[in-house]
Amino acid sequence: MNNSRESKSSITLPELSQEEVLRYSRHMMIPEVGLEGQRKLKAASVLVVGSGGLGSPVALYLAAAGVGRIGLVDYDRVDSSNLQRQVIHGTDRIGMLKVESARIRMLDLNPFIQVDIYNKVLSSENALDISEDYDILIDGSDNFPTRYLLNDLAVLSGKTYVYGSVFRFEGQASVFDARVGACYRCLFPEPPPPGSVPTCAEGGVFGILPGTIGTIQATETIKIILGVGATLSGRLLLYDALEMSFHLVHLRKNQHCRICSLEATITDLIDYEAFCGAPLHDLAPETADAALDIMPIDLARRMRQGDAIQLVDVREAVELQIVQLPGAIPLPLGQLAGRLDELDAGCETVVFCRTGTRSRRALEILQNAGFKKVWNLWGGTNAWARQIDPSLMQY
């Protein structure tokens, strides 16, 4: 499949109305854009995966710039905890599907564009169909399976992948186009061990940081569409908000890459959850698994009875400032495997985190280490606060 520059050069570019000329006039006065460039933007189609921290600035600025067709993929609903950084949403949209909330804001900003929404998790089963009509794939995700999926999808379909990633005060951005340079797998052939790298939901993110990285992603996307300037293809941008520093790392194509080299062994989309040992989403399970989970009400009853239960808190130390469960042993998930000697393997054990997602991974670590009587607190401290002790903070 041809890239956006080639595919758009072979068709007649759409005309601009008088209203659009007025709207984009500051763009069109730039020699590198002009009337033809603005028509290229109107002819372009871009898929944004994720309408959260990164997806918010990406979607807003692409809409404002006049990118004619923008697809949004997300499976989540707006939550109050999103609003510290996901600026495309608002307080009045809490509970609404993120893709619907984003579309409303984008069309309010620019009614001359088309916004397609896909309220689902992007997966190997649906990625080819969803992405078929889009020229550029933009990563606004927060997990490794989706990053590898987007990279492989881009390589196999001959498209450009605009990458972004944020964590706490640090961010990364790049443009991966295997037709002219390195792909994401060239840089990261293998994912990190499961649970070794916290997501933003687990480790936190400086609210302004996604705005910086997302705006860079939008900038690169517009440059690709216009065919101007030097993109981040072949370079990885590293940003540190605390130090206010930018560094560029030059990338080279891996001649042994599993998907973009002459030795490629990946010829189709694979099972990315199995490959990364992590899910394609960060949603906590909606229902409990009797073999793995204990409900807050059952744990509270057993604690009142005086049963000998070892509570293990796998959240980060900073989270203890917000809420704690009495008597729990603090062992952050990233340290758990190396500190198992601090626990009694023969004692009944309940592990917990904020929502029950990280503690599910902790449960696997303990089971693999030989712990026989171990359960995950379903819903974590948030569920405990809702169901058992409303005086405790939810976050």
Image (cartoon, rainbow, N blue to C red):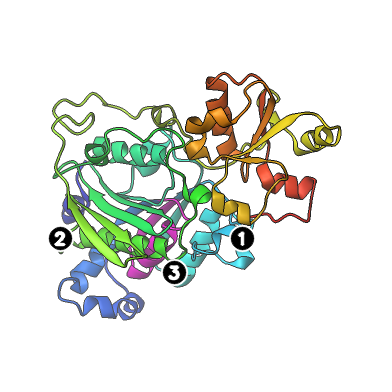
Q: Amino acid at mark 1?
A: Ser
Judged by depth in the image, the label closer to the viewer, 2 or 1, is 1
Q: Earlier in the sequence, mark 3 or mark 1?
A: 1
Is 385 left, or right, of 156 in this rendering? right
Q: Earlier in the sequence, mark 2 or mark 3?
A: 3
Along the line of sight, the residue nearer the viewer: 239 or 64: 239
In the rendered structure, does residue 230 fall within the stretch colored magenta?
no
Q: What span is colored magenta in the figure? A: 49-72
Separation of residues labelled 2 and 1 (CA atoms): 38 Å
Find disc 3 in the rendering and name its residue: 111
Q: Residues within 10 Å of mark 2 (few under 14, many from 20)?
A: few
Residue 80 got which mark?
1
323 w.r.t. 253: above or below: below
75 w.r.t. 360: above or below: below
Q: Return the x and y of residue 123 as percentages of the image width and height.
A: 43, 35
| Element on which disc 2 rests | loop
User: Which image quadrant for residue 192?
Assistant: top left
| Residue under the image location 37 percent in, 70 percent down | 64
| Element on which disc 3 rests | loop
Along the line of sight, the residue nearer the viewer: 183 or 206: 206
Q: Amino acid at mark 3?
A: Pro
Separation of residues labelled 3 and 1 (CA atoms): 27 Å
Q: Return the x and y of residue 298 as percentages of the image width and height.
A: 80, 33
